[in-house]
Image: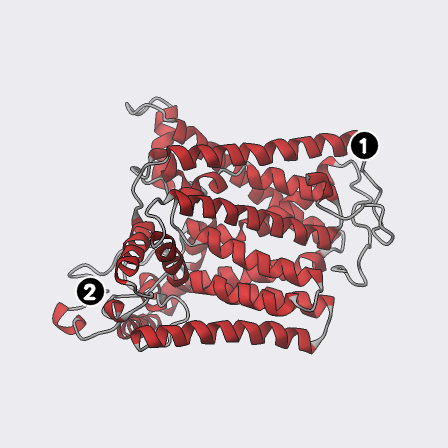
Amino acid sequence: MLSKLAITEDRPGCGLKPTEGTRYYRLLRIFAVISFFVMIAAQMLLLILFSGKQTSDSGVYLFLAKQCAENGLWYPSVEHLSQTYIFGNGLVNLIALILRVTSDLRVFFFINMLFVQMLLWSCLYIIKKAFRRNTICFWFVILFCLLNTFWSEIVQLKTEVPFSALAFCGLALLYSGKKWAYPAAGILLALANWVRPIALAFLIGAVCVILIKSKKLRHILSLLGSYAAVILLIGCISFASCGHFVYQAVTFGYNFIMSANDDADGSYMNLVGEGQVGYIDPELKKDMTFKDCDEYYTKLSLEWIKEHPGDYLKQIPAKLFFLYGTETYSGTAYFNNEKFTGGMAYIKSVANKFTGHSDEPIHIGDVLIILNQIWYMMICVLFASGTVLLFKKKQWRSMLPLWLSMLCGTGITVVVVGAARYHAPYLPIMMVCAAFACECIFSGEKKKIAEKYTQENPLD
């Protein structure tokens, strides 16, 4: 199955020495297949054994979905107008739809498994079209499937996996060059934005694909037109439901103020308690809608930044660290969601266990999380190496749409607040570069790989 992922490597114009049939090719394909089934087995095991409660944002999504399912509501509805913010709109409605059929969350966990498959195969199709080399696909499968983030995240009701699957599937369609793919991609990106409001970053990447591949204005208009049509549809349904045109999450102001206050350090913080900068007097808040709250927090944030521009800008390095520094946030599933595993505090606690400075025993979840962190750090190093190699081998145009998506998404995040789980949609992009680096390192063709091929039109 995996050997048929990509087009034949002997295709004219590829400019690469064929590796099909070589020992390197056969071994790499075997490792890719093994990695793929390791991930499937781990996901199935978690799907069966996980019995924890949904916590944090996942718990709120589930609560809102149950409320909608029981009362026949669409999220958001009039009942939600007084909330501080609206978030995860598309995900909440999907969960509510499932709950109307069954109360067993394992159905959603299985759907998450399908989303992971959708993400994986979309990325492989992009690699196939951009690099035309099976072995890079195999390296990507290994890197992707052995990052156990994609094992544990299936049992969490979060936005990251559905968003990433929809966004990358939309991008993958554009690489096909089919006429129907342009409006279909716009629909998928709009649905992704409904789940998580950062699809604009991937929309920019999508336009870049068209500019490089077809250079036709009508294709861009087809993409943007379908994107706008879906947004209009979602907004109109929301307007009928709650009296407000809401097509995506309304959380900007709430997140913005986390980095626009005297105690801000670039990380996520709770600021709505009494005496804190985000606290709103109940008498005032009872007449405020989520849009009023968003405008209020945005106004406070802008006023603070005008007075403290230097303090705001100094947080950028910290935000980038909080965004890309760790990959432990998804490990809570290994503890049945009874233990928070995100951030440096958890890593220090595990280090104390391994060095004998803690009486708490080492849990299998600790081992999996630390291995995941090590694997992620290796991917980061390979990502940096792959980026350098892509420029050195003059293939940077093949990655430009993905890099633009990652850069724009990172920029959107840095404006507000940094958190490790926010980098999840960019993991596949990092892995594409990492897979390219692995191919350069291990294929034995460092001098020949990617020599000038597809310089005329790298995505054809």
The x, y position of residue 340, in whole percent, is: 32, 40
Quadrant assignment, res 443: top right
In the image: residue 360, left or right of residue 225: left
**Residue 22: mark in rendering:** 1
Identify the residue at image location x=59%, y=66%: 184
Q: Quadrant of the C terminus?
A: bottom right
Residue type of the residue flagged with mark 2? Tyr
Quadrant assignment, res 76: bottom left
> Which of 457 and 319 lies nearest the eye of the viewer?
457
The x, y position of residue 218, in whole percent, is: 68, 77
Above or below: residue 103 compared with residue 42: below
> Which of 256 and 311 lies nearest the eye of the viewer?
256
Identify the residue at image location x=62%, y=40%: 141
* Contact between labelled residues 2 and 1, with CB atoms less than 8 Å apart: no
In the image: residue 280, left or right of residue 356: left
The x, y position of residue 261, in whole percent, is: 29, 64
Above or below: residue 414 compared with residue 233: above
Of marks 1 and 2, which one's residue comes earlier in the chain? 1
**Residue 279: mark in rendering:** 2
Separation of residues labelled 1 and 2 (CA atoms): 65 Å
Residue type of the residue flagged with mark 1? Thr
Question: Callout 1 environment at 10 Å: few (<14), some (14 to 19), or many (20+)?
Answer: few
